[in-house]
Amino acid sequence: MAIQAMNITIKNNNIMRSKREKFKRTLGGYGKGSKTEYNLPKASAKQLKDIAKRLKEEQQLRMIKVIVVTVILFLGVIILFAYSAEVLREFLWL
C-alpha cells in the first residue's frame, strides 16, 4: 500500500511540474517579455572619477576597520589563552 501511494505522489508531482512556468520567480526572468536593458543615467568623466575616488576611500576605510577589529580580537584571544594557561599551571601544581 505504501509503494502505491509513493508511485501516485511521484506521478502527481511530474504532472504538476510540467504545468508550471520554469524559472518563474527569478529576478531577471527568462520569459519572452523580459527586458535586459537598463536605463542608466549619463555620467561625465569627472563624475566617474569622483565616484571612483570615493569608492577607493570607502574601501580603504573599510579595510582599516577590518584590520583594527581583527587585531583587537586576536589580542583578546592571546590574553585569554595566557590567563587560562596561568590558571591551568596553578591548578596542576597544587
Image: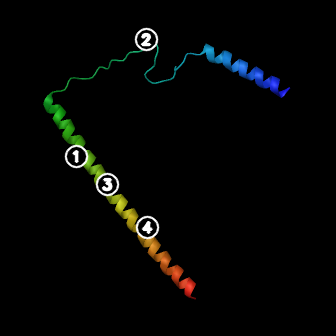
* Cβ atoms under marks 1 and 2 closer than 8 Å: no
The residue labelled by disc 4 is 77
Q: Earlier in the sequence, mark 1 or mark 2?
A: 2
- The residue at the point 77 percent across, 22 percent down is 7
Between the residue at mark 3 and the residue at mark 4, the CA separation in whole angstroms equals 18 Å
Query: In this rendering, would 64 be left or right of 10?
Result: left
Q: Earlier in the sequence, mark 3 or mark 4?
A: 3
Between the residue at mark 1 and the residue at mark 2, the CA separation in whole angstroms equals 41 Å
Between the residue at mark 3 and the residue at mark 1, the CA separation in whole angstroms equals 12 Å
Answer few, some or many: residues within 10 Å of disc 2's Cα (few below 14, many 20 plus, some between 14 and 19): few
Residue type (three-letter) at the residue carrying disc 1: Glu
- The residue at the point 21 percent across, 41 percent down is 54
> What secondary structure is marked by label 2?
loop
Q: Earlier in the sequence, mark 4 or mark 1?
A: 1
Q: Earlier in the sequence, mark 3 or mark 1?
A: 1
Most extreme residue toward the left, as rendered? 46
Q: Position of residue 14 (x, y in %)?
A: 67, 18
* Cβ atoms under marks 4 and 2 closer than 8 Å: no
Quadrant of the drawing holding the N terminus: top right
- The residue at the point 27 percent across, 23 percent down is 40
Query: In this rendering, would 37 be left or right of 50?
Result: right
Q: Earlier in the sequence, mark 3 or mark 2?
A: 2
The residue labelled by disc 1 is 57
Residue type (three-letter) at the residue carrying disc 3: Lys
- The residue at the point 29 percent across, 19 percent down is 39
Query: In this rendering, would 72 be left or right of 48?
Result: right
Q: Earlier in the sequence, mark 4 or mark 2?
A: 2
The residue labelled by disc 3 is 65
Residue type (three-letter) at the residue carrying disc 2: Gly
> What secondary structure is marked by label 4?
helix
Numbered badge on residue 33: 2
